[in-house]
Amino acid sequence: MADLWVPGSTIRKFTDPKSPLANANMVGCAHTQVGSYEGSWNWGNQDGNPYALCYCRGSGELVSAWPVNLRSAANLEGNPYVFPIECEDVNPLYFPAWSLKCGDVPAWTDAQVQTLIETFAWWCIRFNRPPVLIPDTKPGRVGLAYHRQGVPNSPEWVTGNDKWSNSVGKCCPDWRRIAQFKQEVVPGVAALVNGDDMIEADFDRINAENLAVTRAEVQRLAQYLAKGESNTAFPAAAWSSGTTNPELLAAIPHITTIDVAALAVAIVAAMPPTQPGGEIDQATVEAGVRAVVPEIAAAVIAEIAS
Ligand SMILES: [Zn+2]
């Protein structure tokens, strides 16, 4: 699929080689960098180093460094299914000087908390994941997490967990941010996802944006098919740059395997050998199919909209 980026984020894509493998996006995970944004992006960019998919600056700006549909290297055994956000904690504009040791990580800024809420809410809606804290990092968990849950020998560690780090004793994102995650971020995400009145407008906006993209893409495919060109030539890149509608994404493999000419051949073959009005040839059937493709597309759009 095309690259998927968090809407509204600043895209600063890594230039060194990163994983091309698909990310199942089962768990959204918060991290703390023990560093500045600039330093962390550069560290992550270097081939072979750990890296997250997104970086949240002290200002609240979210920087996307690698597509959400691909894997990070921030959660070890969780990499195939975790969407990680790194967060800045060293920056004199936003944080007091600190020891860079566990127990001393400064709290997230209000702007960072807000960005985490909005980003994880988008992610939950986009992938249909529940806005809840997972109880542990055992395989198959779905929801939100902080890194320390998957660190061996951490206070949260239980037998059977996936290891999200080899650094025993790692406290990421440390107690202040863990408290914020539990008390502010997760409830804030839940309020957004569950359509709390105060943020109903945001929820509607996200859905409206998704639907607009969906409509445009289905209409484009309909025009393409109606022109008589083989859908197999429909360029993948023409699809869904920025598509965030899970129903459409699920439907795309089916839509894009419609071969109108082959369908017409199959219809003709399925007909009785003689018709009262005479034989109908494949070209006539194909023309008819192409004529109704826009109608079918309209029905698909209506279905998605309902
Ligand atoms: Zn971490």
Image (tube, rainbow, N blue to C red):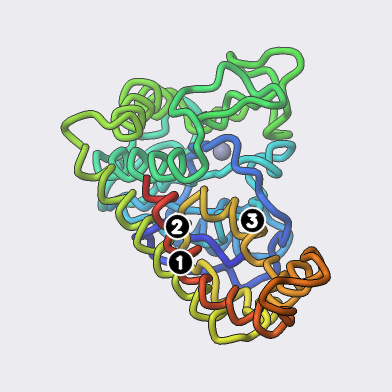
* Image quarter for ligand 1: top right
Name the residue type under label 3: Leu
Residue 228 x, y percent position in the rendering: 61, 86
Q: Residues within 10 Å of mark 3 (few under 14, many from 20)?
A: many
Asked whether the residues under the numbered discs 2 and 1 touch, taking CB atoms below 8 Å apart as contact, a structural biologist would say yes
Mark 1: secondary structure: helix
The residue under label 2 is which amino acid type? Ala
Spatial distance from mark 3 to mark 2, Cα to Cα? 32 Å
x, y percent for residue 183: 33, 21
Q: Quadrant of residue 182?
A: top left
Residue closer to the observer: 186 or 57: 186
Q: Residue at x 57, y 27 (%)?
A: 148
Q: Real-space Cα distance between discs 3 and 1?
A: 35 Å
x, y percentage for residue 296? Answer: 50, 63
Residue 168 at least partly seen = yes
Report if residue 92 is visible in the image.
Answer: no
Question: Tag 2 or tag 3, which sits nearer the N-term?
Answer: 3
Q: Is mark 3 within 8 Å of ligand 1?
A: no
Q: Which mark is residue 295?
A: 1
Instruction: Please determine whether, in this image, residue 82 is positioned above or below residue 135.
Output: below
> What residue would you read off at disc 2?
299
Q: Position of residue 223 (x, y in %)?
A: 49, 79
Query: Can you tell which quarter of the image residue 44 is in?
Result: bottom right
Q: Which residue is mark 3?
A: 70
* Placement of the N terminus among the 4 image quadrants: bottom right
